Image (cartoon, grey):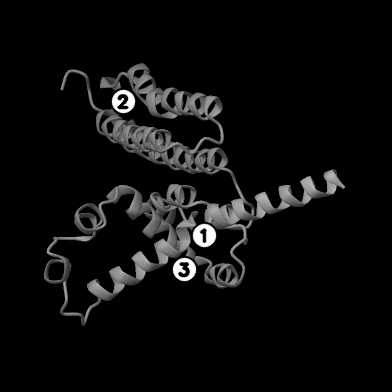
Amino acid sequence: MIKDKINEIHENVKSELKKYNNSWIELGMKLVELTEQIEGKDVKISWKSKFQVSNFSEYCTVVLKKDYEKMIKIRMAAKCLKNKRNELYEEYVNDKKVNIPGYSLIYVVESKKKKLNEWEKYDELIGNLFEDEYSRSRIEEQIRVYAKQNRVSSTSNKRAKTAKDSGSYNFELIKRREKIYLDIIPSLRDEIDSVFEGDDDERLVEIREVMDRLEEKIREVVNEFNGVSEDE
């Protein structure tokens, strides 16, 4: 009898937890709706005229008194859900316990949308996110794989262009430069993911984003230096 009661309570806890995990969705949809109403083509009302702020970020900070970066992520995730899996959202409307990825996980994909579209991998990763239920670490690893494949291809093309004048290039130095964004940073990020696996702490999310930007910046710098004589 007691065991049955505990099992029942346990199932209720899991049910309520799913509702709790999805609690961002309604807020996100309202933020999307508000933005569309104010920033629509034929709308004469602006953030300034209505709320005395310059933009959505200020609206979150000044009017809502909330962390604007978090609100932006929630809005972005809701917009993705609405545009890419609206049928899932409609299912959620009828059943709040529907399994939907967290906003911070959706943001991992959405924040890389431009690059993923360039690599023709965005829709594939959206499927991995919603249908295959990839974890954060697996999503981030997949993005790194796509990035590495693209960078290796880009680097190979650049080397081919400079091959005619290879006498003045230090290819060992080029290799060391490339290793920074191909191996060193990804290895550090993998170690962080391994140690904090499954942890969605906002500080860890920020660290991952900073590392992504660092890797991208280093790649840009390295690509500029690649093929350039050290004497120049």
Judge whether 180 appears above or below 85 on screen: above
Of circles 1 and 2, the one toward us is 1
Identity of the residue drawn at 43% across and 50% down: 107
Q: Secondary structure at mark 3?
A: helix
The answer to whether residue 167 is left or right of residue 196 is left
Nearer-N-terminus badge (1/2): 1
Residue furthest out toward the front: 1
Pointer 1: residues within 10 angstroms few (<14), some, or many (20+)? few
Of the pair 185 and 161, the residue shown nearer to us: 185
Residue furthest out toward the bottom: 42
Relative image position of residue 120 (x, y in whole percent)? 47, 56
Q: Amino acid at mark 3?
A: Lys
Nearer-N-terminus badge (3/1): 3
Q: What separation in Å lies between label 3 and label 2 (alpha carbons)? A: 51 Å
Q: What separation in Å lies between label 3 and label 1 (alpha carbons)? A: 14 Å
Q: Which mark, by number, is residue 166?
A: 2
The answer to whether mark 3 and mark 2 are in CB contact below 8 A is no
Relative image position of residue 222 (x, y in whole percent)? 30, 29
Image quadrant where one finds the C terminus? top left
Of the pair 205 and 216, the residue shown nearer to us: 205
The answer to whether residue 150 is left or right of residue 89 is left
Identity of the residue drawn at 60% across and 70% down: 91
Of circles 3 and 2, the one toward us is 3
Of circles 3 and 1, the one toward us is 3
Residue named by callout 1: 123
Relative image position of residue 201 (x, y in whole percent)? 45, 36
Residue named by callout 3: 82
Q: Secondary structure at mark 2?
A: helix
The answer to whether residue 41 is left or right of residue 18 is left
